[in-house]
Image (cartoon, helix red, strand yellow):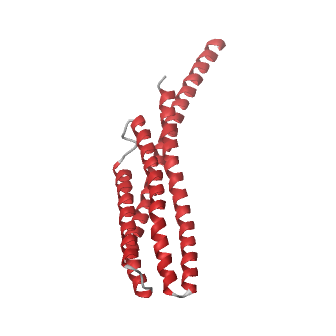
Amino acid sequence: MDLDNLREQWKSLNIKVEDLQVENMRLRHDIQTNKVTSINRRLIARIRSMLLVCCLAPIFIIYMKNEIALTTATIVCYVSYFIIIGAAHGYLLWRLSTRDYLSMPIAAAIKEAATLELYRKRMRMWSYIMAAPVIFMLMMDIYKYGYPGALISGIIGGLAGLAIGLRLEYTNRKLMRQIRQLLDQIDDCNVSDNP
């Protein structure tokens, strides 16, 4: 009698452990999917603010034109640069906003995240290449302005802007990588759930 009672208790413990393992896997999956959604929202907010900066930058050049005699070529290059970069950020924002990683098949979601990460890398590379002539033309116009303090201020402002931009880029890249890693973990979790 004692042995039968012990066997029943052992079986009930096994069932409870299996139920707890299933519940832990479900909770882990829920936490990871919530993290993906949260990180995606943060990334969308950051890209939206960068798009706003791209829209406001041409207004800044109008102010600069009144303060320093900027050439028409410099103004056209500056405005064109921010229109192109703004369009690239707008496209990225659209892609991030319209994709629901959790409703997609996990393989497609991982591929989409990798594709967007590659797009950001290429966008960053092209933005550096396009920014070089714009910065050069701005510095030349400031140098022609004739006031050495303006050139030094321009260089300091450019370096500060570069530092801020690199920090923003690092954070955005980290967020994109986190989304892809979480999707990989969800995929691993799904594979281990369904042997």
Q: Pinpoint residue 115: horizontal percent, then vertical percent.
A: 42, 44
Q: Pinpoint residue 103: horizontal percent, then vertical percent.
A: 36, 40
**Number of numbered discs visible in the structure rendering:** 0
Q: Residue at (42%, 81%) from the top-left corner? A: 70
Horizontal side, residue 48 vs residue 160: left or right? left
Q: Residue at (43%, 82%) from the top-left corner? A: 64
Quarter of the image where one finds residue 16: top right
Position of the N terminus by quadrant: top right
Front-most of residues 156 and 55: 156
Q: Residue at (42%, 57%) from the top-left corner? A: 44
Front-most of residues 18 and 93: 93
Q: Pinpoint residue 52: horizontal percent, then vertical percent.
A: 39, 68
Does residue 118 lie above or below 28 as drawn?
below
Front-most of residues 123 and 106: 123
Q: Pinpoint residue 45: horizontal percent, then vertical percent.
A: 43, 60
Does residue 84 lie above or below 94 as drawn?
below
Front-most of residues 34 and 156: 156
Quarter of the image where one finds residue 48: bottom left
Q: Residue at (39%, 59%) from the top-left corner? A: 89
- Residue farthest right in this picture: 2
Quarter of the image where one finds residue 92: bottom left
